[in-house]
Amino acid sequence: MKTVGLLGKIVMYALILISAVLVFIQIQAGEAGTEPAEVAMAKGAGSWTGTIVTWGIAMLAIGIIVAAASLIFNIFTNPSGIVKTLIVIVGVVAIVALCWFLSDSTPLDLVGYEGTDNQSPWLEIADTGIFLAYISFGVAVIAIISSEVAQRFK
């Protein structure tokens, strides 16, 4: 089990390093629209934005796969905890469904945008992701505060 923990730490640090390097490259390249077009294009402004978005989506997908695999692994290694694991799965599905139903598919008024991504499924997916981020942030803040309060009373 120590090997798994060590491997997990190595992978985590590697992913953090890759993310930091991508952000550093984007910062060095600059942002399109903040300087003259010739200078921005020479520096490669905005050329890394798509890569960073793709990296973020890949990190999200890896996180979801690892979380699902962890739940499945927990079912096989701890059969007595199946009920708790199923409660967690149902809870996550319910939260995602709630966020999906709260999402809005009204097209945005984007000046100068003529693309096809400003429509129903993509807008609902984006809203769902935003709502999930808000809920995750709130749960994290509550967990931090409650753990600190619990430690004070021990």
Image (cartoon, helix red, strand yellow):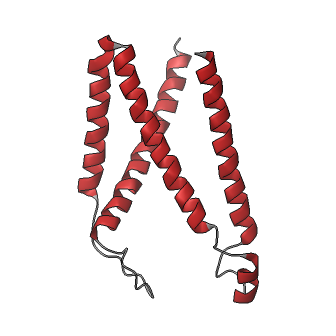
The residue lying at 44 percent from left, 86 percent from top is: 111
Q: Quadrant of residue 101?
A: bottom left
Front residue of this view, candidates 11 and 32: 11
Taking 83 as reference, is 21 above or below it? below
Residue farthest along the left direction in this orientation: 101
Q: How many marks?
A: 0
Taking 3 as reference, is 69 above or below it? below
The residue lying at 48 percent from left, 37 percent from top is: 140
- Please state the horizontal and vertical placement of residue 68, each as a whole percent of the image: 39, 34
Front residue of this view, candidates 34 and 23: 23
The residue lying at 30 percent from left, 51 percent from top is: 99
Q: Is 76 displayed left or right of 19 in the figure?
A: left
Front residue of this view, candidates 89 and 136: 89
Q: Quadrant of residue 47?
A: bottom right
- Please state the horizontal and vertical placement of residue 114, each as a whole percent of the image: 40, 85
- Please state the horizontal and vertical placement of residue 77, each as a whole percent of the image: 39, 15
Q: Is 92 displayed left or right of 10 in the figure?
A: left
Image quadrant occupied by the N terminus: top right
- Please state the horizontal and vertical placement of residue 149, each as a whole percent of the image: 51, 23
The residue lying at 48 percent from left, 41 percent from top is: 63
Q: Is 99 displayed left or right of 13 in the figure?
A: left
